[in-house]
C-alpha cells in the first residue's frame, strides 16, 4: 500500500465527519427558516430595548446609551440566528431535523409558521387588548381551547417566555453591574441566581401561564382547527418532542450567552473611555 493511499484512507473518516457536520448545519439553517424562528428573532431587539430602558431608568443618559449599545450588539438577530443554528445542528440529528421539515413545509405547517411570524413581528398591543376583551363576551369553544392548551404545553411556551425575560433581565443586571466600581460589583454568579429566582418565582410562572392561552389564541386566531390539531399531533410524536426540545434549548442557551455578552461589551467600552 503506497503512502499516498494510506494518507487518503486516513482522511476518509475525517472527510465523512466534516460532510456530516456541513449537512447538519445546512439542514439546521433550513429549519430556522421553515420554523419561523429566524423571522421571530427580529422582534427581540425592540422588546429588549424597551425592557432595558424601563429597568435602567435611573441611569444617566451616557450610561444608558452604553448599555443599549452593548445590548443591541449582543442581541442582533443575525448573530442569534447563527448561534442558535450551530447549537441546533449539534443537538438534533439529521433524521429529526428532516422529520420536522417535512411537517413545517406542509401546507398546514406553513400556515402555522406564518401565524407565528406575524404574531411576533406585527404584534399590536391595542388590538390584542381588544381581542382579549372580545373573548370575555364570546369564549373559545372547548375544542379549540383544548387544542391551544395542547400546543402551549407541547411548544414549551412558558419556558420560552420565561427564558426570554430572564435573558433580558440578566443582560440589564450584567451591564449595570459592570459599570459599577470594582468593589461594588456582585459578579455573574450572584446575578444569575438573583435574576433566576426573581423571574422563575411561582408568582411569575403563574402570571405567564395565565397570559399564554389568550396570547396563543390571538396568534392562531385565523388558523383552522384542523391545522392546530395536526400541529399538536406532530408535536406529540417522539420526533416532534425532540425537535421542540432541541429548538427550545438552543434558543435559551443562545439568549443566555447574549446576556453575558452585554456585560462584557459594556465593561470593554467603559475601560476604553476611562483611559
Image (cartoon, rainbow, N blue to C red):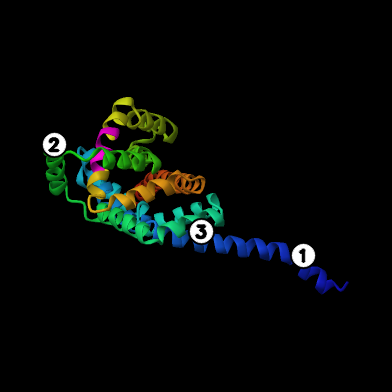
Residue placed under numbered mark 2 in the picture: 136
For residue 115, side relative to residue 98 (left or right): left
- Mark 1 highlights which residue? 10
Of the pair 268 and 141, the residue shown nearer to us: 141
Where residue 53 appears, x then y in whole percent?
22, 44
Read off the magenta span. 209-215
Q: CA separation, marks 2 and 1? A: 68 Å
Count every numbered label the image shows and give the total: 3
User: Label 2 vs label 3: CA separation?
Assistant: 41 Å
Q: Is residue 219 visible?
A: yes
Can you give x and y, in whole percent of width and height, for residue 216 in the image? 27, 44
Residue 214 colored in magenta in the image? yes
Q: In the visual, does 140 lie left or right of 110? A: left
Badge 3, how many Cα within 10 Å: few under 14, some, many 20+?
Answer: some
Mark 2 or mark 1, earlier in chain = 1
Name the residue: 29% across, 47% down. Answer: 67
Give the mark toward the camera: 1 or 3: 3
Q: Nearer the viewer, residue 65 or 23?
A: 23
**Helix, strand or loop status at disc 1:** helix
Residue 137 is one of the magenta-drawn residues: no
Of 274 and 60, which appears nearest the observer?
60
Kindly indicate the quadrant of the structure image that contains residue 22: bottom right
Residue located beneath label 3 in the image: 98
The answer to which quarter of the image holds residue 187 is top left
Amino acid at each position: 500500500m503506497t503512502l499516498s493511499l494510506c494518507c487518503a484512507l486516513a482522511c476518509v473518516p475525517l472527510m465523512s465527519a466534516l460532510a456530516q457536520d456541513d449537512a447538519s448545519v445546512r439542514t439546521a439553517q433550513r429549519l430556522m427558516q421553515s420554523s419561523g424562528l429566524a423571522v421571530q428573532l427580529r422582534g427581540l431587539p425592540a422588546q429588549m430595548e424597551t425592557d432595558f430602558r424601563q429597568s435602567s431608568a435611573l441611569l444617566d443618559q451616557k450610561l444608558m446609551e452604553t448599555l443599549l449599545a452593548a445590548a443591541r450588539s449582543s442581541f442582533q438577530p443575525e448573530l442569534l440566528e447563527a448561534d442558535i443554528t450551530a447549537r441546533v445542528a449539534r443537538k438534533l440529528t439529521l433524521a429529526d431535523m428532516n422529520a420536522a421539515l417535512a411537517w413545517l413545509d406542509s401546507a398546514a405547517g406553513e400556515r402555522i409558521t406564518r401565524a407565528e411570524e406575524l404574531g411576533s413581528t406585527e404584534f399590536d398591543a391595542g388590538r390584542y387588548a381588544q381581542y382579549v376583551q372580545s373573548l370575555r363576551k364570546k369564549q373559545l369553544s372547548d375544542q379549540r381551547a383544548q387544542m391551544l392548551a395542547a400546543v402551549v404545553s407541547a411548544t414549551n411556551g412558558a419556558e420560552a417566555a420565561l427564558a426570554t425575560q430572564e435573558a433580558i433581565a440578566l443582560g440589564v443586571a450584567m451591564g449595570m453591574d459592570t459599570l459599577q466600581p470594582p468593589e461594588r460589583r456582585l459578579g455573574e454568579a450572584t446575578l444569575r441566581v438573583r435574576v433566576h429566582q426573581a423571574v422563575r418565582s411561582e408568582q411569575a410562572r403563574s402570571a405567564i401561564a395565565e397570559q399564554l392561552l389568550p396570547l396563543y389564541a390571538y396568534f392562531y386566531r385565523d388558523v383552522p382547527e384542523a391545522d392546530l390539531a395536526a400541529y399538536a399531533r406532530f408535536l406529540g410524536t417522539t420526533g416532534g418532542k425532540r425537535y421542540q426540545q432541541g429548538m427550545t434549548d438552543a434558543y435559551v442557551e443562545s439568549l443566555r450567552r447574549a446576556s453575558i455578552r452585554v456585560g462584557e461589551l459594556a465593561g470593554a467600552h467603559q475601560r476604553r473611555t476611562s483611559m
